[in-house]
Amino acid sequence: MTGDDRVATLMWNNQEHVEAYCAVPSMGAVLHTLNPRLTPEQLVYIANHADDRVVLVDGTLAPLLEAVLPQAPPTAHGGCDGGRRPRAAAA
């Protein structure tokens, strides 16, 4: 990761989310949230605008992420599917 890589979180407010808030900037990347209450279209806009490279997702929100994947940035990866697209994985 470089200082300009963006990492999105699609998570509830829980301990794992707090840990991401500490860990991601410590790695030199920029962290931002994807609000699970937004529509898939709004999430796609935000992810594309940010040019996310990684999406950290809570397992309970995997169906919402799956709705976003077809239009997600091509460089994104979450649970990596051997390619460059994020894959919903249990947290």
Image (cartoon, rainbow, N blue to C red):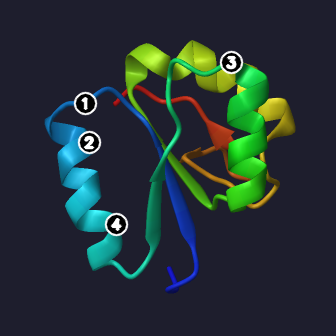
Residue at mark 3? 39
Q: Which three-letter amino acid code belongs to the residue tagged 4? A: Val
- Nearer the camera: disc 1 or disc 4: 1
Quarter holding residue 49: bottom right
In this view, 47 is above or below 26: above
| Residue at 50%, 86% in the rendered image | 3
Q: How far apart are marks 1 and 4 (CA)?
A: 16 Å
Are discs 2 and 1 less than 8 Å apart at CB?
yes
Q: In this view, does 47 lie to the left or right of 22?
A: right
Choose the circle earlier in sequence order: 1 or 3: 1
Image x and y of residue 68, in percent:
73, 28
Q: Is residue 66 above or below residue 8?
A: above
Residue assigned mark 2 = 17
| Residue at the (47%, 19%) spot, across then down | 61
On the image, the x and y values in percent for residue 28 come to: 39, 82
Of the two numbered discs 2 and 4 on the same chain, state the one appearing first in sequence. Answer: 2
Whether residue 85 appears in this view of the structure is no
The residue carrying mark 1 is: 13
* Neighbour tally class for label 1: few under 14, some 14-19, many 20 plus, Cα within 10 Å: few
Q: What residue is pinned by disc 4?
A: 24
For marks 2 and 1, give the CA distance. Answer: 6 Å
